[in-house]
Image: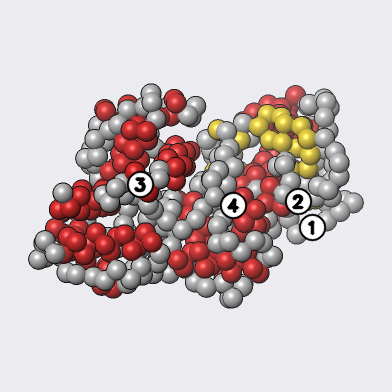
């Protein structure tokens, strides 16, 4: 599945044959693809309402294939085929009918969806003469149009009354859904939040996968265990890390259990993809989330010549915006001064690479750089460090209760964390992120000195 809400791609990659054939791939502008498909499958002499209804179905069918990553999730490097046994007709170099070209220019960024659902409907159709199917009959649209049906009424006739048409969807380059870096314990992102929701939905059909209680974008112990179980079931390397192979296998199985590539698909709703990480950072705002961004920028700017550090104060002001622009320019990303998905993922990757390259001797007993997000249920050396710092602070500040250095993030550690957050005026959260960690290390180092 694409990341977020459906958009119209600038181009589409078409495989000129059956999916498993050694045929050529061609990448063509999406609107030209639709004109070609329509000119190959329907007649320009048909009533205009019939032509429009068919083009709506053809646009939506292609968008469903792209949105669900139907073929990439199966290991193919294209979006759709031109085999009518699997998809819709595309004939390279064919002539385009003038009236079909005009109508396609109007409709190529409109698509059909079920009411209350966000994904493009799988608008199954057939010609209605040599083949029939549960969806739209291309030849059947002609008598309906001649009887006075509007394009929308024709679509309702075949797909049901509970459909809407989304008009003027944005046109933009479509990102692959894979975030570009392996996801593992200690990371946090909207990609992880979506992954967690997908694994929980897959679990309904595969109950051996343990439930992920916290669908919050933090890759915790429960997420890792769910990933390992998924990998075991589907015969992938059981490392608990979501690389490209695991990511797209999750997509494939998720598409299957929700039937997203079928006419009777289960609704994909906004709450299934709503972001939980950096959802509404705006210039002029002040937030803990912005402190997270500033922490990454400050560390990256310290270690990489040509980039500047930034104050970690939570204020999204001109200096922070300029630091984001410099980072985007340096890494050849679209320069906007905003934290979009691509910028966030690259920032996390660069930070993790820097952090991994720092030897332990660099710290000489001082507090270390942020090692990764933590929350209850996690265990390991990072949790042990968290406990060590909290224990030392509890010896100085009576309002912070002591915990134990066990390496397991349990209730005692959570209570100490809450007390530390109250001590410094942070909002109470069970998640330890860069902002809280940075303040914790500063306090620890000050006491240690």
Q: Residues within 10 Å of mark 2 (few under 14, many from 20)?
A: many
Tell us which disc is closer to us: 4 or 2: 4
Residue at the spot of label 3: 361
Q: Earlier in the sequence, mark 4 or mark 2?
A: 2
Which residue does the image show at 65% across and 53% down from the upper left?
Answer: 245
Q: Position of residue 145 (x, y in %)?
A: 72, 43
Q: Earlier in the sequence, mark 3 or mark 1?
A: 1
Residue 9, above or below 428 = above
User: In this orientation, which residue lies closer to the viewer: 79 or 420?
Assistant: 420
Dot 1: what SS? Answer: loop
Query: Distance between the Cα atoms at labels 2 and 3?
Result: 65 Å
Query: Distance between the Cα atoms at labels 3 and 1?
Result: 68 Å
Dot 3: what SS? Answer: helix
Q: Is residue 109 visible?
A: no
Q: Earlier in the sequence, mark 3 or mark 4?
A: 4
Asked if marks 2 and 1 touch (Cβ < 8 Å), the reply is yes
Tell us which disc is closer to us: 3 or 1: 3
Residue at the spot of label 4: 243
Q: Position of residue 83 (x, y in %)?
A: 83, 44
Q: Position of residue 336 (x, y in %)?
A: 40, 28
Query: Distance between the Cα atoms at labels 2 and 1?
Result: 7 Å
Dot 2: what SS? Answer: strand
Residue at the spot of label 1: 133
Query: Distance between the Cα atoms at labels 4 and 1?
Result: 38 Å
Q: Which mark is residue 125?
A: 2
User: In this orientation, which residue lies closer to the viewer: 101 or 342?
Assistant: 342
User: In this orientation, which residue lies closer to the viewer: 145 or 38?
Assistant: 38
Tell us which disc is closer to us: 2 or 3: 3
In the image, taking residue 336 as reference, residue 63 lies left or right, namely right
Which residue does the image show at 44% across and 46% down from the upper left?
Answer: 356
Q: Residues within 10 Å of mark 1 (few under 14, many from 20)?
A: few
Q: Position of residue 187 (x, y in %)?
A: 43, 53
């Amino acid at each position: 599945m694409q990341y977020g809400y459906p958009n119209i791609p600038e181009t589409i990659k078409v495989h000129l044959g059956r999916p498993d054939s050694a045929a050529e791939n061609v990448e063509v502008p999406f609107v030209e693809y639709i004109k070609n498909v329509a000119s190959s499958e329907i007649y320009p002499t048909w009533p205009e309402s019939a032509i429009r209804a068919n083009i709506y179905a053809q646009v939506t069918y292609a968008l469903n294939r792209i949105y669900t990553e139907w073929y990439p999730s199966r290991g193919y490097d294209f979006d759709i085929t031109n085999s009518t046994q699997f998809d819709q007709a595309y004939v390279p170099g064919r002539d385009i009918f003038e009236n079909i070209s005009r109508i396609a220019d109007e409709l190529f960024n409109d698509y059909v969806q079920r009411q209350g659902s966000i994904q493009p409907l799988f608008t199954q159709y057939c010609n209605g003469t040599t083949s029939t199917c549960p969806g739209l009959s291309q030849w059947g649209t002609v008598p309906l149009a001649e009887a006075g049906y509007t394009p929308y009424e024709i679509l309702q006739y075949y797909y049901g009354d509970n459909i809407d048409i989304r008009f003027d969807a944005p046109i933009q380059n479509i990102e692959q859904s894979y975030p570009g870096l392996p996801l593992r314990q200690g990371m946090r992102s909207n990609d992880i939040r979506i992954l967690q929701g997908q694994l929980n939905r897959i679990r309904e059909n595969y109950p051996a996968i343990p439930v992920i209680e916290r669908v919050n974008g933090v890759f915790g112990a429960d997420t890792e265990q769910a990933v390992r179980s998924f990998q075991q079931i589907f015969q992938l390397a059981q490392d608990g890390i979501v690389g490209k192979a695991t990511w797209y296998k999750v997509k494939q199985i998720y598409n299957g259990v929700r039937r997203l590539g079928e006419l009777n698909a289960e609704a994909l709703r906004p709450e299934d993809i709503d972001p939980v990480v950096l959802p509404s950072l705006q210039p002029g705002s002040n937030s803990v989330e912005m402190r997270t961004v500033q922490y990454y920028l400050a560390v990256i700017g310290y270690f990489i010549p040509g980039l500047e550090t930034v104050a970690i104060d939570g204020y999204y002001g001109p200096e922070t915006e300029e630091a984001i622009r410099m980072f985007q320019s340096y890494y050849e990303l679209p320069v906007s001064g905003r934290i979009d998905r691509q910028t966030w993922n690259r920032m996390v990757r660069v930070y993790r690479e820097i952090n991994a390259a720092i030897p332990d001797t660099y710290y000489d007993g001082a507090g270390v750089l942020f090692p990764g997000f933590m929350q209850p249920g996690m265990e390991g050396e990072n949790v042990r460090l968290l406990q060590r710092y909290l224990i030392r602070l509890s010896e100085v500040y009576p309002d912070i209760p002591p915990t134990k250095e066990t390496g397991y993030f349990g209730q005692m550690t959570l209570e100490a964390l809450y007390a530390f957050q109250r001590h410094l005026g942070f909002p109470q959260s069970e998640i330890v992120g860069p902002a809280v960690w940075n303040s914790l290390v500063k306090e620890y180092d000050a006491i240690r000195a």
